[in-house]
Amino acid sequence: FAVTTFGESHGPAIGCVVDGCPPGLALSAADFAADLSRRATGKTRHTSARHEADEVEILSGVFEGLTTGTPIALLIRNTDARSKDYAAIAAQFRPGHADYTYWQKYGTRDPRGGGRSSARETTMRVAAAVIARKWLRERHGVEVRGYMSQIGDVVPRDWNPDAIDWATVEANPFFWPDAGQVPELERFMDALRKSGDSVGARVDVVATGVPPGWGEPIYGKLDGELAAALMSINAVKGVEIGDGFAAVAQKGSVHRDQMTPAGFLSNHAGGVLGGISTGQALRCSTAFKPTSSLRLPVDGLDTRGQVVEIVTTGRHDPCVGIRATPICEAMVALVLIDQALRHRAQCGDVGPVEPRIPAEPGVSRP
Ligand code: EPS
């Protein structure tokens, strides 16, 4: 299950090609609306004010409402691009932005917004993952869900990470698991937006229903592919699987997830051992840096190497992590469907093998 995307933030359209989708999956343009809307800009005052329609056209790979097994091409036309916002910085490098590295790599500059480096590109990842999530849900009962677990230095207060209330998460613009804290986050973001600065965030994803056995043992480990997939999202600076970096301070006697006939007693491993799923909930956490397109002036360089004052105008996200929950879910789903199909191809006749331990009764965290 391979995905490639194309298009620039301010070009005429963005799109993707999904290759390797099994035939016979019911798919229509309407399937994409909900997830694309969860990710979209312009829904609240806390994200970029750009209003894109984000309507998917299916160009190929679907006949009479069913996938055919041939490449699925999806297209979304950009309807609210405004390249003139970028005129002032068209020949400047925003500190902390990919402007400079793209320049060094390609020797050219696409001044239309972030071009390929814009988070606009993540739209197509979410669109491609709609197909993956549908197949995973229908064939395996897999559900991939995420929530924001930190914004700046604010963490949820009144919540149980082992029993996330998904209705609460979906009912607020931050995908935040603690409903009572949402007004505080609104005030936090309002103050941040007025200040012209930006802030980072952390997004957790939990995939349930993943059977044991998905993943490759050495190259293409499930956790390795998840890390690469999540790290490939714009602005990501860190990925953890299970307890992640907290495992450094744990004793082995604590970290090992004890197995009983009734289930695992904990899930420090995050549902992966040796690159292969255990059948427990898959747990990933992703760190987003504060975005670099700021109204606050800073000295920087232009493409001639001259020192200039850089101020970014336009419609930007003061915290790109706010819209990142559906994107992280998408990347996890894309890895899972690929691993599921690879597992089916190689080991389709094997298993389930006894003893098969049920998913853990509860998920423990450090
Ligand atoms: C983005 C900058 C803004 C955001 C964009 C991501 O776009 P513009 O180039 O129009 O200023 O609106 O996000 C989207 C358009 C989107 O659909 O996610 C950036 O610099 O990453």
Image (tube, helix red, strand yellow):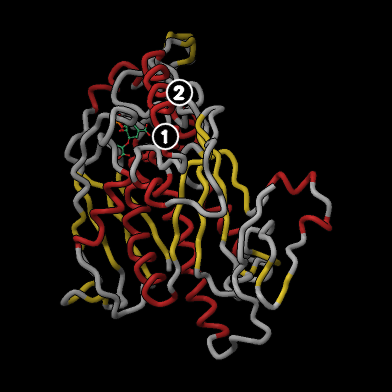
Estimate how packed mark 2 is, as few (under 14), some (14 to 19) or many (20 or more) residues with alpha carbons within 10 Å: many
Question: Residue 138: where, in percent of width, then height?
Answer: 36, 74
Image quadrant of ligand 1?
Answer: top left
Residue found at x 29% / y 76%: 25
Contact (Cβ within 8 Å) of mark 1 with mark 2: yes
Question: Identity of the amino acid at label 2?
Answer: Ser
Q: Which residue is label 2 attached to?
A: 198
| Residues packed near mark 1 inside 10 Å, few (<14), some (14 to 19) or many (20 plus) | many
Task: Find disc 1 in the rendering and name its residue.
Answer: 320
- Ligand 1 neighbours mark 1 (CB distance < 8 Å): yes
Relative to residue 66, is residue 328 drawn left or right? right
Viewer-nearest residue: 232 or 170: 170
Helix, strand or loop status at disc 1 = helix
* Residue 226 vertical position relative to residue 196 in the rendered view, above or below: below
**Cα distance, mark 1 to mark 2?**
9 Å
The percent position of residue 230, horizontal first and vertical second, equals 52, 50
- Residue 208 is left or right of residue 324, and the answer is right
Among the 4 quarters of the image, the one containing residue 110: top left
Examine the rendering and report whether any part of residue 65 can be seen: yes
Residue 200 vertical position relative to residue 206 in the rendered view, above or below: above
Q: Residue at x 79, y 44 (%)?
A: 249
* Residue 166 spot, x, y in % from top left: 41, 52
Q: Is residue 220 visible?
A: no
Residue 214 figure quarter: bottom right
SS type, badge 2: loop
Mark sitting on residue 289: none
Q: Nearer the viewer, residue 48 or 304?
A: 48
Tag 1: amino acid: Val
Name the residue: 83% across, 56% down: 252
Work out whether residue 72 or residue 330 is closer to the camera in this orientation and state it. 330
